[in-house]
Image: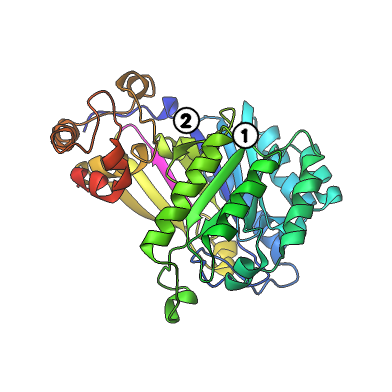
């Protein structure tokens, strides 16, 4: 492959804070429910040490976005979040227009905590609402109810410097079409500009995977998707990515950088990174267990993206974008298209899975996105 342009590749920062009150039965993220006294301070120090050691990957770039994910970051003291942001700021690692996102569970959304976070630079919140229906929340075994979800949104609406996104899940056991429609209607009635909407998938290594669950039939799930699309479009929301909807172009800058094949540095237990050098692209994963990461925060397992693997790695990201990516935009971002990629692109076009101008799935190609992506394998 040709030489890459690391200094011109946008860079984001992901910080993984793994603690949760409980293990949600559908979740396969790297979490920890056994937080001990002193763990939080030790982890923050390890993350700061990791950041210092990661300058070789940063290559003098500034972060265009920062994302505190988990786990439940809102279980962490705001002073420790401030410690990380102060280090980034004093080291001049934060871009002027940096989007700084923070994940919450509804129960931790308090005015005092939000005010503290806003004062130290957090400007985007992602709240794991999942549903406004208590039956659905009970099926998901969430630790909040519908009233707490609405209360959280009312509180965050009072902090004008923070943009808000919420998560909703559909295709849940016992969830009816009417209850999901109500979820979307409530969402559209709120002062929120971004929605992440996910179909429940039963992943291996989750509690749900070990149970026989009666989830809605495919026909019901399709009705949910169609109803949601109709209601969201009516409220001037449009889908810009597989699971993402926005109004007024309030995209997630952080996630857009992932899908546009930018770089990202991951700090914290089990955090993932994608780093470009002149000669190669490398994906890395940190040690997963909290204690292990604290003892050795810079240790990673590496996977170099080979010439054979580059095409599908690129397609898996670019094709998530509903409007696709133009060739001019790819050129401006210094994203290299190999000869083999272009041949596979022609094949996808001939199979009516891909459009002719740029990297974009047709309507049928987007509906069957896995098949479309596999064109590049």
User: Which image quadrant for residue 158?
Assistant: top right
Q: CA distance from mark 1 to mark 2?
A: 13 Å
- The residue wearing badge 2 is 10
Could one spot residue 108 in this view of the protein? yes
Q: How is the image coloured?
A: rainbow
- The residue wearing badge 1 is 99
* Relative depth, front residue between 258 and 47: 258
Q: Where is residue 288 drawn, in percent x and y?
A: 50, 65
Whether residue 215 sits left or right of residue 192 in the image: it is: left
Whether residue 341 sits left or right of residue 73 in the image: it is: left
Please tell me whether mark 1 or mark 2 is closer to you in this view: 1
Q: Where is residue 13 drawn, in percent x and y?
A: 55, 42
Magenta extent = 271-278
Q: Residue pushed farthest right? A: 112
State the residue at coordinates (32%, 46%): 367
Q: Quadrant of the N terminus?
A: top left
State the residue at coordinates (50%, 77%): 207
Q: Earlier in the sequence, mark 1 or mark 2?
A: 2
State the residue at coordinates (42%, 61%): 220
Q: Where is residue 254 drawn, in percent x and y?
A: 53, 38
User: Is disc 2 placed on a helix, strand or loop?
Assistant: loop
């Amino acid at each position: 492959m040709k030489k890459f342009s690391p200094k011109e590749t946008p860079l984001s920062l992901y910080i993984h804070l793994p603690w949760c009150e409980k293990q949600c039965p559908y979740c396969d993220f790297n979490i920890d429910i056994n937080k001990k006294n002193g763990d939080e301070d030790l982890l923050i120090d390890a993350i700061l040490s990791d950041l210092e050691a990661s300058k070789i990957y940063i290559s003098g770039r500034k972060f265009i976005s920062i994302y505190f994910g988990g786990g439940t970051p809102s279980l962490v003291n705001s002073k420790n979040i401030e410690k990380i942001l102060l280090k980034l700021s004093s080291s001049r690692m934060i871009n002027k227009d940096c989007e700084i996102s923070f994940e919450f569970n509804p129960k931790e959304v308090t005015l005092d905590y939000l005010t503290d976070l806003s004062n130290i630079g957090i400007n985007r919140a992602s709240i794991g609402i999942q549903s406004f229906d208590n039956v659905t929340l009970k099926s998901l075994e969430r630790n909040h109810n519908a009233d707490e979800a609405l209360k959280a949104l009312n509180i965050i609406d009072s902090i004008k410097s923070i943009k808000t996104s919420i998560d909703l899940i559909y295709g849940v056991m016992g969830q009816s079409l009417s209850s999901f429609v109500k979820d979307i209607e409530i969402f559209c009635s709120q002062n929120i500009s971004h929605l992440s909407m996910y179909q429940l998938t039963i992943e291996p290594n989750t509690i749900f995977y070990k149970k026989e669950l009666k989830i809605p039939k495919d026909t019901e799930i399709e009705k949910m998707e169609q109803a949601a699309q109709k209601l969201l479009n009516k409220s001037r929301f449009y889908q810009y990515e597989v699971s993402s909807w926005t109004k007024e172009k309030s995209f997630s800058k952080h996630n857009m950088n992932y899908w546009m094949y930018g770089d990202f540095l991951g700090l914290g237990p089990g955090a993932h990174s994608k780093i470009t050098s002149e000669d190669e692209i490398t994906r890395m994963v940190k040690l997963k267990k909290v204690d292990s990461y604290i003892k050795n925060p810079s240790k990673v397992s590496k996977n170099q993206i080979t010439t054979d693997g580059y095409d599908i790695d690129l397609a898996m990201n670019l094709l998530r974008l509903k409007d696709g990516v133009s060739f001019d935009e790819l050129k401006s971002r210094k994203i290299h298209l190999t000869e083999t990629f272009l041949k596979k692109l022609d094949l996808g076009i001939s199979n009516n899975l891909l459009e002719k101008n740029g990297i974009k799935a047709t309507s049928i190609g987007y509906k069957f996105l896995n098949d479309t992506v596999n064109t590049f394998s």
